[in-house]
Image (cartoon, helix red, strand yellow):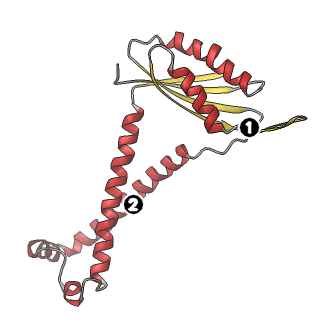
Amino acid sequence: MNRQAVTGTSTGADRRNRAGLLLVGLLLLGVGAYGLARGWGAFGDRAAAEPLLVDDWRRFVGRNRAWFWPAAAVASLLAALLGLRWLRAQLAAGTPRRVDLTHRGDGGTTVVRPAGAARALADDIETYRGVTEVSARVTGEPEAPEIDLRVEVVDSCHIPSLRSRIEQEALARFQQALELEAVESNLEFRLSARR
């Protein structure tokens, strides 16, 4: 059984999003570490005693301390909760269970790495007309693995024909190569910015 989705988001945008968030996180971590180190006297007692905020900001905070600190605490808590939710979504999507595709027979043992099998399938599909990039991932149980495919296509690509070709040719070869009775596939088509 095959499931498909058609979206317009690029995997390149996903990578840029993650890279940008990583840089922001590292920047915030560095600023926080600097503030803690300075407050604990790592840069000398004089630097530890000096305020971090300029006089105008300190006066503003001092005049509005009745509402400023509770608002800052709520904003920080919301930012932390949103960050944890995003991180959980990233980790859940990026860490599938490991699938063991090892074959044991009378003549010996054949070890098949799921990442290698998925890459071979992706390389096969990338040769199809209209396809610009493919990412593949093997998940599920060893007896009934699933293959998640994200296929980037040009906007002129006829997706129903491409889907049929992937199912009848590439997935059939994948199933035959791994000597599986069936392979469930999850196809996601994305429009690529490249021509």
Identify residue type, mark 2.
Ala
Q: Which residue lies furthest to the right in this view?
A: 106
Above or below 155: residue 115: below
Residue for point 63% across, 22% down = 2
Q: Considering depth in this image, is 170 or 18 the residue closer to the camera?
A: 170
Q: How far apart are marks 1 and 2 (CA)?
A: 39 Å
Where residue 115 sits, quadrant-wise, is top right
Describe residue 108's horizontal placement relative to residue 162 as left or right.
Answer: right
Name the quarter where the N terminus is drawn: top right
Along the polypeptide, which appears first: circle 1 or circle 2? Answer: 2
| Residue 49 image position (x, y, % from top left) | 20, 87
Q: Seen from this angle, which residue lies furthest bottom?
A: 45
- Asked if labels 2 and 1 touch by Cβ distance under 8 angstroms, the answer is no
- Per the image, the residue denoted by label 2 is 80
Q: Name the residue under label 1.
A: 101
Q: Nearer the viewer, residue 100 or 2?
A: 100
- Single out the mark in the foreground, 1 or 2: 1
State left or right for residue 58 relative to residue 181: left
User: Residue 175 shows which numbered tag?
Assistant: none
Q: Is residue 58 left or right of residue 134?
A: left
Q: Where in the figure is residue 168, as x and y percent of width and height?
A: 64, 13
> Which residue type does callout 1 highlight?
Leu
Residue 190: x and y in percent read 44, 25
Near mark 1 (Cα within 10 A), the count class, few <14, some 14-19 or many ≥20, is many
Quadrant (top left, top right, bottom left, bottom right) of the C terminus? top left
**Dot 2 surroundings within 10 Å: few (below 14), some, or many (20 or more)?**
few
Task: Give the vertical position of 150 relative to 139 (above or below).
Answer: above
Q: In which quarter of the image is residue 101?
A: top right
Q: Which residue is drawn at 57% across and 22% down?
A: 124
x 38%, y 24%: residue: 192
Residue 20 vs 43, above or below: the answer is: above
